[in-house]
């Protein structure tokens, strides 16, 4: 097999897709592309995906080809040149920290050097569940192996991290810098800053003398590699020659495997932005589910997962009671999906009449745009797709089929690649007007009706359960109510106030950090306070263990957001029994809530498959290395 290295890609004269495991073939088709070099065909793939390809070859017992691929690519150095690191400053760290490590924390600290050496990584992902000690583990590791630490976190967590340094370590406050409120100097042992200020931070230490650790807290927030925040972090890592990065999150994936691209950009030197489009396409595709064994193995080499259940014997959390309150309302049918759809159809009739009156105008407009596209497509790259749309127009088959959706995308992408951006937008608009008029009318009405029904539903559910809430307030219980939207938050607040409840504070994404902190301070200091918050504004970054009651009626889009919301009160520092109430409509039909539950369950299952279900294939390097 001939292997040619070209920038960050490899070219082989052997079509590796003929030898990989059948289960992975469609997934790997996305990352292995055939290219012509002169009169010869080669097969091109980014070096990052060499791991997946070799693992699939091993899984299919193609050991000779796998060995050849390893020996002639970057994997040879990675797998054979082992120099595992050791915690040189472990004794010093023991003097610095006030608390002892739990067994799982101690295990990570002792073996961090080996973990990152497996694939010559720049660091590791601590996917520890909420309340299992990510903060202590990361700080201990950074000072057992290194000499300095930089913590990057959401703005709301800077004070929390300052508190953690004081609570966990003997490091004097003047040796911990909170940037940009304070300016760093070489005497600081640690710097804490937020994601937005990373690019402004000038590191005062000499990286040739000091070993600097970067700790990224709530790493699930930054996710994709192409975001501005992630790019700033990556440039910071490269500019400061940081080779120890610890990512912290109990929920590293919200629902799409491609979210991990940001983590790989920071942790794996083989990953770069040339690999990114292949990664997103492959890991977001339906085929990723079939190749999940490869993904699991890839993650096992760069991430350690710790759940509460795994270390329950080491934890002393009080009981948590999750209670569903089935609630009867007068006209439950108006909250059913069928009822909402029926009303949307009725109300969209006026809009449809307008669409039908302008049908011939929309039709001619699209024909004119297609003629312009044909003039641009001089080498007939998309002629078959243009022809398909023309035939549908001529036959009056004005329905957006799967083939037409695909044709639309191909034409749009082609125009963008030719820098015909204005024509691309004209084409998109013309297609929507002609083929999607009915859908646009319907969805416009649907969104308005859905919003109104959602508001009415939460108001009615809290109205029906007002006695429970008033009883809890009378017992001086602090209550957190979570909801998805600001408009549902206002509806809940109005309902409670109507019944004489006044001690209410709110937290939303629109509020300034100062306003949010004020609401949280009132909640912490005043018993009997109700804090109403949107999931997105309060589902991470705050510890609210002064309260032990959580209530919700509408769900977030992903299970991890609900999990994080509950974790504001049910976490390691909670000392009291915790109660989680879900106010649910009592209906045998599919309601708004049941639709939300299905969506939450869908993403929950994807995450469960990734982290909790054992791989069906036991793939490792030993067969080849032997």
Image (tube, rainbow, N blue to C red):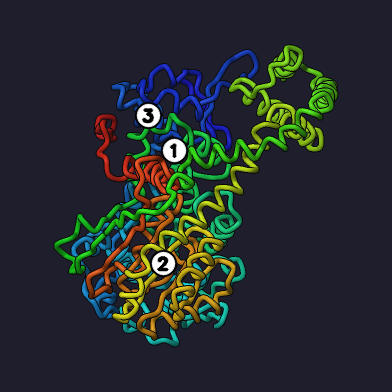
* Among the two numbered marks 1 and 2 on one chain, the one whose residue lies closer to the N terminus: 1
Residue that lies at the very extreme toward the front in this rendered image = 330
Residue 362 sits in which quadrant? Answer: top right
Tag 2: Cα neighbours inside 10 Å, few (<14), some, or many (≥20)? Answer: many
User: Any mark on residue 74, and which?
Assistant: 1
User: Any mark on residue 481, and which?
Assistant: 2
The residues tagged by marks 3 and 1 sit, at their Cα atoms, a distance apart of 26 Å
User: Any mark on residue 385, and which?
Assistant: none
The answer to whether one can see residue 376 in this image is no
Q: Secondary structure at mark 1?
A: loop
Q: Is residue 609 left or right of residue 383?
A: left
The residues tagged by marks 1 and 2 sit, at their Cα atoms, a distance apart of 52 Å
Q: Position of residue 78 (x, y in %)?
A: 38, 42
For the point 35% across and 66% down, which residue is it?
550
Tag 1: Cα neighbours inside 10 Å, few (<14), some, or many (≥20)? Answer: some
Q: Mark 3 sits on what residue?
A: 290
Image height of 557 relative to 181, above or below: above
Quarter of the image for the N terminus: give it. top left
Q: Position of residue 509 (x, y in %)?
A: 55, 66
């Amino acid at each position: 097999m001939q292997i040619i290295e070209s920038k960050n890609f490899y070219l082989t004269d052997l079509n590796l897709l003929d030898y990989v495991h059948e289960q992975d073939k469609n997934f790997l088709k996305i990352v292995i592309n055939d290219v012509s070099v002169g009169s010869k065909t080669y097969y091109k793939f980014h070096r990052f995906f060499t791991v997946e390809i070799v693992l699939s070859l091993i899984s299919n017992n193609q050991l000779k080809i796998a060995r050849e691929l390893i020996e002639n690519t970057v994997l040879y150095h990675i797998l054979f040149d082992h120099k595992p690191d050791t915690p040189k400053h472990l004794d010093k760290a023991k003097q610095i920290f006030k608390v002892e490590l739990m067994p799982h924390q101690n295990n990570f600290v002792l073996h961090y050097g080996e973990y990152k050496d497996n694939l010559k990584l720049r660091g590791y992902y601590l996917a520890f569940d909420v309340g299992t000690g990510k903060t202590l583990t990361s700080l201990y590791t950074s000072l057992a192996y290194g000499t300095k630490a930089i913590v990057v976190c959401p703005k709301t967590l800077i004070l929390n991290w300052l508190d953690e340094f004081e609570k966990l370590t003997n490091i004097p406050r003047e040796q911990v810098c909170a940037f940009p409120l304070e300016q760093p100097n070489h005497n600081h042992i640690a710097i804490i800053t937020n994601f937005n200020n990373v690019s402004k931070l000038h590191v005062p230490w000499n990286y040739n003398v000091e070993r600097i650790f970067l700790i990224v807290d709530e790493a699930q927030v930054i996710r994709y590699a192409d975001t501005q925040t992630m790019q700033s972090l990556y440039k910071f890592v490269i500019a400061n020659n940081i080779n120890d990065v610890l990512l912290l999150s109990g929920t590293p994936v919200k629902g799409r495997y491609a979210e991990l691209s940001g983590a790989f950009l920071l942790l794996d030197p083989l990953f770069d932005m040339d690999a990114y489009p292949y990664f997103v396409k492959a890991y977001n595709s339906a085929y990723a589910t079939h190749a999940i064994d490869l993904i699991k193995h890839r993650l096992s080499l760069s991430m350690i997962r710790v759940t509460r259940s795994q270390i329950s014997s080491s934890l002393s959390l009080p009981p948590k009671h999750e209670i569903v309150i089935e609630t009867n309302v007068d006209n439950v049918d108006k909250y059913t999906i069928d009822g909402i759809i029926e009303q949307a159809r009725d109300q969209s009739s006026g809009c449809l009449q307008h669409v039908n009156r302008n049908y011939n105008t929309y039709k001619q407009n699209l024909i004119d745009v297609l003629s312009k596209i044909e003039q641009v497509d001089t080498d007939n790259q998309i002629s078959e797709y243009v022809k398909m749309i023309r035939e549908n127009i001529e036959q009056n088959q004005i329905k957006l089929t799967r083939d037409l959706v695909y044709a639309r995308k191909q034409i749009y992408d082609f125009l963008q690649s030719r820098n015909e951006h204005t024509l691309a937008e004209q084409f998109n608009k013309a297609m929507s007007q002609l083929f999607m008029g009915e859908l646009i009318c319907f969805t416009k009405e649907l969104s308005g009706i859905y919003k109104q029904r959602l508001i009415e539903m939460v108001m009615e559910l809290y109205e029906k359960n007002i006695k429970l809430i008033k009883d809890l307030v009378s017992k001086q219980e602090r209550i957190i109510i979570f909801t998805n939207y600001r408009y549902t938050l206002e509806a809940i607040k109005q309902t409670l106030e109507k019944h004489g409840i006044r001690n209410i504070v709110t937290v939303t994404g629109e509020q300034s950090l100062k306003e949010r902190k004020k609401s949280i301070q009132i909640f912490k200091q005043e018993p009997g306070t109700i804090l109403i918050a949107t999931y997105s504004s309060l589902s991470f970054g705050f510890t609210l263990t002064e309260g032990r009651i959580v209530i919700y009626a509408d769900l977030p889009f992903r299970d991890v957001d609900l999990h994080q919301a509950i974790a504001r009160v049910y976490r390691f520092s909670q000392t009291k029994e915790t109660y989680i109430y879900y106010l649910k409509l009592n209906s045998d039909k599919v309601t708004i809530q049941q639709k939300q539950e299905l969506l939450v369950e869908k993403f929950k299952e994807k995450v469960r498959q990734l982290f909790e279900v054992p791989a069906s294939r036991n793939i490792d390097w030993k067969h080849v290395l032997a």
